[in-house]
Image (spheres, rainbow, N blue to C red):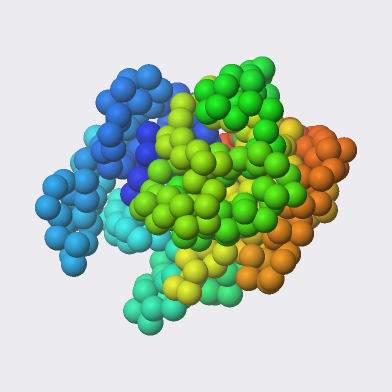
Amino acid sequence: MKILWMTDDFLPHYGGSRLLYFHTMKHFPPGEVTVLTKRRPGWREFDAREKLCIERGFFATLPGRPPFSMLPVYAEMFARGMRAMARGRADVIVCGEIFPTACVGRVLGALWRAPYVVYVHGEELGVLKRLRTGRRVMQSLLRNAGAVVASASPPRDEALHQGVSPGRLHLLRPAVDDYFFSREPSPLAARARYGIGDRPLLLTVGRLVERKGHADVLRELPALAREFPGLAYLIVGEGPAEERLRLTARQAGVEGSVIFAGRVGRDELVDCYAACDIFVMPNREMPDGDTEGACIVLLEAAACGRPVIAGVAGGTADSVLDGETGFLVDPERPGEFSRRLRSLLGDRELRRRMGDAGSTMVSARRWEECARELRRICARCIEEGGGRR
């Protein structure tokens, strides 16, 4: 079986869907997957290190791309896809997104008589269903796909609502890299690096965007610090909301207790998870429908034995067992988030128990099984769609 995997973005640009794709395709037989994606800073070193078959480009990465038109992006993606199919005709096309890759994948599949598979994660469905033209195109792409793969329960349910046949819809929840279980973390090293010492510590890992809820944590810090002296908040990640979050920290008078670590390497990331007392991410659904998909950072924190508090919006319920591995909260409901924070900060035994439960839950998930199931899905699509002709 030969697979052409098209995705608008990929590692080393960090993100949940990029990690999901990377760890899944790493467990495919060598040479079975060819990836088409865009260039990102550090891509040459990443591709050389990982030794995956990756072709990078896409007009979207070039300076001066007109923001009002995506046509050049579709054109280059299509041209690269045609060249890839001509070099080594794929039996199936896996599309990482509805727009733009499923649009291009559907045309390529029709020309080369190969079925296409579409991933859905949640945030894109919420946005597109609010747009009249976008909703119609989305429905057509999903209904005509050989299979639709959802990374969490909410996008699976939404895909059903958009008319996808249950027999062609598959739920493949993400797992956690074995690295998180094989490496002995050094929490003291992370605490020393950021000058935290033995202070109680909250941690958020993720892109700095409004829906993640960093600002909610910052606004709770002053009151929490009076009850739990020395409380610190470590923020790992980059994003457009950073300056706004720094301003929020200053306005709340907690600037000295908040550490913006930026992007960190994998070794340091594991240490940060192990160093925290609670992992927090009170995410929410945005007015335009943007919401959290399958959230791998919640699983990573659980793998490191840390309790989690996350927002109830999006796909977080697939990664947090409410009341067992952590708490799911509605950050819009007054006092709910702070109440859960206080209960965990004040109860070491509860933190330990939830952390142990989370580690046990995550250890049952493996990327190898995700890869095996996706290969079965692709093979079935080839069989039903005729495959290579």
Residue 56 seen in the figure: yes
Q: Residue placed farthest to the left in the image?
A: 64
Quadrant location of residue 374? top right
| Residue beneath the point at 76% across and 56% down | 340
Q: Find residue 360 and report its horizontal and vertical position in percent.
A: 79, 35
Residue 319 at x, y = what percent?
Answer: 68, 49
Residue occupying the point 84% across, 43% down: 347
Name the image quarter holding residue 231. Answer: top right
Residue 314 vs residue 335, the one in the foreground: 335
Q: Residue furthest bottom?
A: 132
Identified at 63% across, 26% down, the residue is 197
Vertical position of residue 320 compared to residue 181: above or below: below
Q: Which is nearer the eye, 199 or 96?
A: 199
Task: Name above or below for residue 328 compared with residue 55.
Answer: below
Q: Is residue 387 left or right of residue 283?
A: left
Whether residue 293 is visible, yes or no, is: no
Residue at image position (45%, 48%) is: 207
Query: As drawn, is 38 to the left or to the right of 114?
Result: left
Q: Is residue 9 above or below residue 157?
A: above
Please state which of residues 244 and 83 is positioned toward the viewer in this rendering: 244
Residue 369 screen position, x and y as percent = 65, 36
